[in-house]
Image (spheres, rainbow, N blue to C red):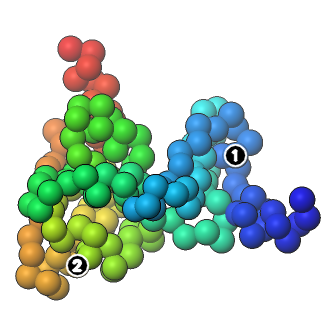
């Protein structure tokens, strides 16, 4: 495979450190169920800024988009910032998607989200709050509301909360 083909596939230069640290690979599917992006999460200890990496030059979408096809109007849909938070929610049989941060949020996502009763469970940091504010602003523009569930103190994100509750 030539360098041009590697770059076009997103596996070219600058792919990101996470791909070299025994990663877990998360596929991102579009509404039709086709893989359109891959995200690597390093399993070896690395700087937290290098823990995740997507294919380069390929736009990221919402994680778990195909679930939107199975939901009914006004059905509850949970939004999380991280894929692992989304997977934790799915294991509890919650309808869930993930939007991996403010830069990944696109204004057209509101078209996919507006039919549902949207509840966001943001990470307990400035990035989670910024993502909630950005999505909420999109809802406000079309005179719709969404809600937020704030995790109890001491939990960074939903996955931390989930693990603690599973311990009993």
Residue beneath disc 2? 138
Q: Quadrant of the C terminus?
A: top left
Asked which quadrant contains residue 63, the reply is bottom left
Q: Nearer the viewer, residue 73 or 157?
A: 73
Residue 58 at x, y percent in the picture = 61, 69
Q: Mark number for residue 4?
A: none
Residue beneath disc 1? 19
Q: Is residue 164 above or below residue 117?
A: above
> Which residue: 46% across, 55% down?
33
Residue 47 at x, y percent in the picture = 60, 45
> Which residue: 88% across, 66% down?
3
Farthest residue in the bottom direction?
A: 141
Q: Nearer the viewer, residue 108 or 156?
A: 108
Q: Is residue 105 above or below residue 65?
A: below
Q: Secondary structure at mark 1?
A: helix
Residue 112 at x, y percent in the picture = 28, 70
Farthest residue in the top direction?
A: 168
Residue 29 seen by the camera? yes
> Which residue: 20% across, 54% down?
71
Q: Dot 1: few (<14), some (14–19), or many (≥20) neighbours within 10 Å?
A: many
**Residue 73 placement, left or right of 20:** left
Q: Secondary structure at mark 2?
A: helix
Asked which quadrant contains residue 41, the reply is top right
Residue 167 at x, y percent in the picture = 27, 15
Lower sequence index among marks 1 and 2: 1
Residue 124 seen by the camera? no
């Amino acid at each position: 495979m030539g360098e041009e083909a590697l770059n076009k596939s997103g596996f070219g230069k600058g792919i990101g450190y996470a791909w070299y640290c025994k990663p877990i690979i998360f596929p991102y599917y579009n509404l039709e169920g086709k893989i359109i992006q891959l995200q690597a999460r390093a399993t070896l200890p690395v700087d937290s800024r290098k823990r995740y990496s997507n294919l380069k030059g390929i736009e990221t979408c919402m994680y778990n988009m195909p679930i939107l096809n199975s939901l009914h109007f006004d059905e509850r849909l949970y939004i999380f910032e991280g894929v692992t938070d989304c997977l934790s929610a799915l294991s509890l049989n919650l309808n869930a998607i993930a939007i991996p941060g403010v830069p990944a949020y696109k204004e057209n996502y509101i078209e996919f989200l507006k039919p549902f009763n949207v509840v966001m469970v943001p990470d307990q940091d400035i990035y989670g709050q910024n993502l909630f504010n950005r999505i909420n602003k999109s809802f406000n523009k079309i005179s719709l509301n969404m809600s937020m569930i704030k995790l109890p103190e001491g939990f960074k994100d939903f996955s931390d909360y989930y693990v603690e509750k599973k311990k009993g």
